[in-house]
Each structure stands twice: as C-alpha cells, then as structure tokens.
Image (cartoon, helix red, strand yellow):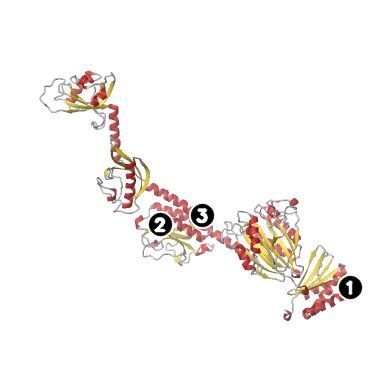
Amino acid sequence: MNDTPVPGDGLLPFSEGTAGVLVDGRGRISGWTPEARTLLGRTGADVVGRPARALLADPASWPALVKAYERGARAGEAVLRTSGGEELPVVFQAFGLADDGAPGGTEGVGAGCLVLAAPASLAARWHQDRAFVSELFLQDRVGLAVFDTGLRLLRTNTHLLPYTGVPSDLTGRRLGDFLWPGDAGAIEEKLREVLGTGQPMIGVEEVLRTLDDPRAGVVITISAFRLQGPDGRVLGVTALFTDVTELRRSSERLALLHRATTCVGGSLSVRETGRELAGALVPGLGDIAVVEIADAVSLGEEPVPDKDGRLLLRRTAVAGRPAEGIEPATTDAGLVADREGSDTGGDADAHAGGGAGATAGGYPFTMTAPLRARGIVLGRVSLGRHADRGTYEAADRDLLREIADRAALALDNARRFTRERRAAVGLQRSMLPPTQTETAAATTSGVYLPADTTTGVGGDWFDVIPLSSARVALVVGDVVGHGLAATATMGRVRTAVRTLADLDLEPDELLTHLDDLVGQLLAEPDESDIEDGESGADADDDQGDSWRIRHPSSPTGATCVYAVYDPVSLQCVVASAGHPPPAVADPEGHVSYLPVDPGPPLGVGGLPFETTEADLAPGSVLALYSDGLIEGRDDDLDAGMTELAGHLARPGALTGSLRELGREIVAGRPADGLGDDVTLLLARTRAIPAEDAFSWTIDADPAAVGTVREAATTRLHAWGLDELVFTTELVLSELVTNAIRYAGGPIDVRLIRAGRLICEVSDPSATHPRMRRARLTDEGGRGLYLVAQLTTRWGSRYSRQGKTIWAEQDFPPAAG
C-alpha cells in the first residue's frame, strides 16, 4: 500500500471500466458493483460483509491507507489481489459518506466511503488523453475546433483565425456568423460530409476571410473526424485548422518566378518579351501590370538618357484591367518620362496610391521595378493591386525585383538579337537582286523569306545574271548555317558566282571554280575539315533523289544550282552542287523536275559536276528554289516537291503574274518561326523570233570577209538599223579576220536583234584573245582595241567546240 498521488489532478474520470466499492465505518465491504466483479473476478456474495483489507495483495498496508484518508488524502494507488491470486495495480479515489451515527473503530473510515478504482494502466491512458486534449487546445500552431451535430462551435482554441474580425467567444456560433458566406459554406459542406459518412477529411485547403476584414484572408488546411459516444451515438465533429498562408504564398511566389522566367526567356522579340512579362505577373502579383521599354531597345540599340538624365519609355505591354474610373491603358501610348530618373538601387519600390499608381492603372497599392541589365536601364515594370488584396509585402518586392532582373536579361538578349538580325537581313537583302526582272530571255520574279529562328537569318540567295548573246543565268544557292557569318559567306559566294558568270563559263566549269573558292572560305575561320558526304561513286543513283543523299548534314558548306537559258536555241543547261532539281512547267501545264545530277555540295572539292540540257518551249516557267521551300512537312521532301508541282500545274498559273504565283507558293508559311530560309526564283522563258537571229558559216579564207560585210549590211537594212552598218562592218571585219588568221575554219558568224545588236564570231580555237595597245610602228594588233571602242561591251566565251567572241551595240534612239 502507498499514498502516491494519482497522476494529473488526482481525479479519476468516470468511464466504462471504473469499479465501485462501498466501505462502511468499520472497514467492511457493504456494496459491490458489477464492474468490481469484472475487475477482481469476485462476486458480491464473496466479498460483502468481509473486511476491505482482504482485497489488498498485502493486507498489512491497510492501516496506512486509513491514516492517509483521515489526513485528507482521498486518492492514491494500491495493489489488489484477484480471485485467481494475481496482483492488480489500481488507482483509486475515495468519497466520504455522511455521518449516520454508526459506531466507528480504530480500523474504520469514519461514517464510511465510496471507493472508485480502475487499473493503473487504464487510468494512465485516461490522464494521457486528458493531457493531450488540454495541451492541444493550448498550443498556437494548429487551430482546433469542436462542433456539435448542428455545426455550432462548442470549443476552440484562441488561434482559430488570428486576425481582425473573429469574436473572442465563439461558443455556440456558426462559421457563417463571422466568415464570408462562401468561405463558411465551403467548410460546412465538408464537415457535414464527415458527420454523415464518418470518413475523416485530411488536408483540404480552404481560404478563410472574415466579414469585418475581407482582405486576402488566410489559407488553411483542414482535417476533420467525427466524434462518437460509447454507444455509437454521433456527438459532433472535431476539425484541425493549420495556417499555411506563408507556405502557400511562398510556393505561389516560387511558381510565379519559374513561370515568369520561362515566359520571358522563350522569345527573342523585344515586344513579345514585354507582353510575356506583363502576362506572367497578372493575376499572381497584381491586378494590372504595365511594361514600359525604351524605343532604342526595340530597335536593337542601347537606350541613352537625355541631357537631364531621364529615359523616355514607351508603353509596350499591359495585362489586366485598370481600376474603376481610370481609362484603359493602351499599347504604344506614347513616350513617357521615367519618373524614377535612373532608378538607382535597382530595388522594387512600393507605393500606396499616387506615384507609380498612375502607371499601374490607378490601383491604391502599386510597386515598380527597373528593367536593368549590364548596368543599363532598359525600361521598367509597374504593378497595381486592389485594396482587397492588401498592401505589397517585402517578399513581393523581392520577387518583383528578381523577375525584373531576369526579364531585363531576356530583353537585352532580344535587343542584341534584334540588332544582329536587322544587320543580317539588311545585309542579305542588299545582296539580292531586284525581285522582278525583264530580259530578252526571260521574265523573272524572286521570293525570299528569312528564317526567324533564335540564330537569325540564313544564307539563301537567288540571282538573275544577263549573259552574252541575250542569254540569262538563273542561280539559287544556300550557305548552310544562320546569322551574320552565313550572310557574309553568302555575299562572298554570290559575288564569286557573278564574277565567274562574267567569264561566260559553262555551268559545270563555273561550279568547279566555285567549289574551290568555297573550300578556301570554309577553311579560313577554323581550318576545320569539311565533310565529304557521298562520293562520286553514286553518280548512277536515281537522279531525283541523289541530291538529298549528298546534301551536307554538317553546319558547313553550301549548295547551288546554276542554269543558263538561251532564247535563240531555246535550250537550258543546268548544273547543281548538292541542290534540289529545278521544276519546269511547259505552256500546256505539264510539270516535271529536270533530271539533274546534283554533284557534291560546294566546298567538298575534287569531285566533278555534270550538266543537264533541256529544251524549253517559249512561255515555260522554270522554278529554282532552296530546300527550305520543300521542307517543313514532317521532313517529307517528296510531299514538298509534289506541293510545288501542284501550284505550277494549277490552271492559269503560268499565264498570270509570276509575282502572285510566287506568293501563292510560299503562302501558309509563318511570317516568323521558319526553320530555314525560303527562296524561290520563277522564270518565264521567252524566244527570240527566227527573223531576229541570222547566222552563216564561212571558210578560213580572207576573201570571205567581204561576203560577211555584205550579208551583215543586207540584214541591218532589213532590220532598220542603217545607222549601225558602218560600225558593224568594221567590227565583223576585225573579228573574222582574226579568226581566219589565228584559228582557221570553219567560222560561224551570227547577228542577233534582242534589245540591242549582238555580233558573234565563233571558231574552233581555244586561244584566248588579248587586247593590246599597238605601237606606232606596228602593222597590226589594233583589231580588238577598235572593237572595244566601237561597241557597248565585248567579250569571249568557250565551249567544247572552241570559242566565241561577241560584241554588243545599243540601238540608235530612233530604232527602238
């Protein structure tokens, strides 16, 4: 026996499992409850009338218990003996009975008492449960509320909603008495479900706002479970409220930072970056966002403050709606002065009305941050928030500053990209010929769409080069890669093509020289090796597909197709260096692709190029293009070529405007976002009438010179070119005489009337004619010098049969 106090406050809770024993003034058992029988395994008949000490495992401890009771100790611990002889530690509490005059004794307990006892282990759990509930209502990290079945609050701790608008005493109140109806209704609906089903609710997030303080409120997670009595009767529901407002806001700020960074980093357009920035900030950080950027940034330049240190900004993007009574902000609303001057410090400044409020749509709470990169202010971003959402906090300002810094870097990248792209596009367009040309051989129309990728424009180009004898060269090329480097390389290659074309080389020979030049250009920057691609062993492969096999996959090299059309012979000679084959649509609307052997890309070196000859009827349309025109259809080149052929075969396509046909072919491609440049050159062929071309063949006999002069004079009179008779006789005399003297026969002479008079003398020799200045004592050597002085231009070209020297004269004004 001992008198150790019962844990807690010494009181036992009345609950199932508590045994009751009635002890009279003499210390004998006078009453025995069923719970006592269950506890000790003894019936009332076994114990009533017997001394209470007999229940103790150590009966000698009884006097100590009596003395403790007499001193006022009404609770304690004891060890009882069950009917089976086992010891059972219990916790008990004694309640004295009124004095009824019964005699006492030295071992009595006054007038008697009622003793309640329970196993010590069970009592310990009772007190643990009581301590847990007590502490739970006292702690300040979790809100606790007990509701009855009508969802009226029975008990709660003081931290249910720790801000203005919550009554101090919530007993008997409904949530709707102090919360916004929508917030209260959402929670009560979930609590009713718990009451009805008995299924616990775990971790549901809700927003709580009070009627007196309807601001942003707090974000809570709610867990709830049903309360039931021992008999299963539903008593109510208990809910645990955890305030996760800061955690939620931190998560939202982090998500907003990630979203804004992703948005502003996805475009290399200054305006688009501004729009993405404004859109990313609303509604997460404000009800309106205004982005203002200096005009110079949109042009790719660095903004420079005026003499007063102010930077003029243009409203670039607005997201959200302005406050009531404020006119909606519009894009490009004009120049505004930077009120923050140079925006020193680079921090986001918060304002309560006024200041940045005008910029931020008139909202009462605003903040502004500069868009600064590399120490240069590019613009600013301003935010406005409605009063219901509360003032901006320090964390909001830090977030805006971080987003503004990242957006400024994206803007600066977009600015520099804009500058480079404008320079590249301007350089490339300056290198391209006029889109529309008219020659005696063909009418042409070109279309060029630069790629708008993150790397800038590419190296595509087209050219129309007038050649001797009324012929024309049509060229389309593609330097692999993008940006200024590709554009510069394209310019050098195009210049080389024009220079080589001026030499009147055959297409295959021109590409051979061009191949050597490109190989040198590619070796200059990094002296890296150039991929060879496929070898010439595949020359017998299918002509329509082999150009794709040899197209370079490395970011170096170039491709080119070079076609020469002769309006007199109506023959087109084509050579290709890794380029797709030209398409031809005849006047009847039949479309085919020339069977061109593409040869290797330019820069590979050491491999030959082949020519393909085709006769074109007058009025045919020849289409040369870059691979960007036929790509982009899931990389199905056949589909792209079929689509091009379909456009050319459309009824009326060949008789209409070539410019409109070109626009139709490239229509549907995005203005921005092309994966590669798109280049298209269309040429409608012409024919020089038979009566405008006169030719004859003579032997290498000096007497034939006079015959040539007479025949030329007769032809010029028939053409009405009498004013050109003298010079033409002199030019032909010199050219034919030189051919007879140095080359031998047979000699072909041809006159062509095609916008100007063209004289040609062809001989079998490959000797290069050379003009020199003769000395006074020389008897010869003045022939070509005289030809150069008397004609508009002259030159020579070579073929497999020999060479041709030609000279051109402009028509007299009256003979046009």
What amino acid is at disc 3?
Answer: Gly
What amino acid is at disc 2?
Answer: Gly
What amino acid is at disc 1?
Answer: Pro
The quadrant of the image that shows the C terminus is: bottom right
Residue 321 is at least partly visible in this image: yes
Q: Where is residue 350 in the image (x, y as percent from the top left)?
A: 39, 57
Q: What separation in Å lies between label 2 and label 1 (alpha carbons)? A: 97 Å
User: Crowding at label 3, few (<14), some or many (≥20) Cα neighbours within 10 Å?
Assistant: some
Is residue 188 toward the left or the right of residue 582 in the image? Answer: left
Question: Closer to the N terminus: mark 2 or mark 1?
Answer: 2
Q: What kind of element bears circle 3?
A: loop
Question: Closer to the N terminus: mark 2 or mark 3?
Answer: 3
Q: What kind of element bears circle 1?
A: loop
Q: Name the residue under label 2.
A: 286
The front one of 419 and 326 is: 326
Q: Mark 3 near mark 1, Cβ–Cβ under 8 Å?
A: no
Q: Where is residue 752 in the image (x, y as percent from the top left)?
A: 77, 73
Q: Mark 2 near mark 1, Cβ–Cβ under 8 Å?
A: no
The front one of 324 and 54 is: 54
User: Crowding at label 1, few (<14), some or many (≥20) Cα neighbours within 10 Å?
Assistant: some
Is residue 430 toward the left or the right of residue 53 in the image? Answer: right
Of all residues, the one furthest to the left in this rendering is 101
Q: Where is residue 372 in the image (x, y as percent from the top left)?
A: 48, 57
Question: Closer to the N terminus: mark 3 or mark 1?
Answer: 3
Q: What separation in Å lies between label 3 and label 1 (alpha carbons)? A: 79 Å
Q: What kind of element bears circle 2?
A: loop
Q: Quadrant of residue 742?
A: bottom right
Q: Name the residue under label 3.
A: 265
Is residue 48 toward the left or the right of residue 613 in the image? Answer: left
Q: Which mark is residue 702?
A: 1
User: Crowding at label 2, few (<14), some or many (≥20) Cα neighbours within 10 Å?
Assistant: many
Q: In this view, does 567 lie above or below 150?
A: below
